[in-house]
Structure formats: C-alpha cells, structure tokens
Image (cartoon, rainbow, N blue to C red):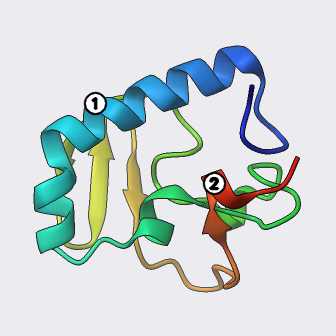
C-alpha cells in the first residue's frame, strides 16, 4: 500500500527501495551533516507528493543517492538542494499522512 497521495504502487516500490539503500549507506553521514527527517522524508500533510514543493529529498525519485553534502544530496541524474528560497513549511514525514 502506498503511504500518501501521488504515488502509485510501482513508484512507491522504487522510492522505498532507494530510501532503504540511502539509509544503509548514508544515514550516519546525513545525520552528521544535519539532514533532518523532513529534509529527507517530508511531504505535504494532505496532498502527499502531489505538492512536490513540500517533498524531501528521498520521496520523489527512485534514483539512488551517490553522495551526501551539507547543502545537497547527489543522485544518479540530479541533485536535491536542502535550502531553496520559497520552499513552503509544514511538511510531515511520509509515514504520518492519513490515506
């Protein structure tokens, strides 16, 4: 079952697998660099990933992480920047969204 609106079963399987890979390889480093739960796993409290501007680094893509830096996470094909002007506040962890 998908945890929030905007994800299909197939999308969620990829996102979940990539998140587990990240946790196995980079969780300690990310924590040391100050990445928070919401930076990584945040989503809109009602609309989930439909509101991508609320989303944390690990909930939109099934790409694997290749590097964690203080200001960004590098994926195979892109980067996620922690601080983006205008990013809304009020995200919640993906596992708390009520379906």
Residue 2 image point, x, y percent: 74, 31
- Residue 4 has which mark? none
Residue 76 image point, x, y percent: 31, 30
Residue 48 image point, x, y percent: 78, 53
- Name, please, the residue furthest toward the top: 10
Q: Tell me the quadrant of the picture where the N terminus can be found.
A: top right
Residue drawn where x is 50% and y is 70% of the image: 38
Residue drawn where x is 66% and y is 23% of the image: 11
Q: How many marks?
A: 2
46 in relation to 95, above or below = below
CA neighbours of label 2 inside 10 A, class few (<14), some (14 to 19), many (20+):
many
Residue 69 seen in render: yes
Snapshot quadrant of residue 8: top right
Q: CA distance from mark 1 to mark 2?
A: 17 Å
Q: Which element type, helix, strand or loop, lies under badge 1?
A: helix
Task: Please say if the residues under marks 1 and 2 sit with CB atoms less than 8 Å apart.
Answer: no
What residue did someone put label 1 on? 21
Snapshot quadrant of residue 43: bottom right
What residue did someone put label 2 on? 94
17 in relation to 67, above or below = above
Residue drawn where x is 30% and y is 71% of the image: 35
Foreground: 88 or 7? 7
Q: Which element type, helix, strand or loop, lies under badge 2?
A: helix
Snapshot quadrant of residue 32: bottom left
């Amino acid at each position: 079952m998908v945890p929030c609106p905007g994800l299909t079963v197939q999308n969620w399987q990829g996102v979940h697998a990539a998140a587990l890979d990240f946790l196995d390889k980079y969780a300690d480093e990310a924590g040391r660099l100050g990445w928070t739960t919401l930076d990584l796993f945040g989503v809109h409290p009602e609309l989930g990933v439909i509101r991508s501007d609320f989303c944390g680094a690990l909930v939109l893509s099934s790409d694997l992480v290749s590097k964690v830096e203080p200001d960004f996470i590098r994926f195979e094909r892109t980067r996620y920047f922690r601080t983006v002007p205008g990013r809304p506040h009020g995200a919640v962890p993906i596992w708390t969204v009520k379906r």
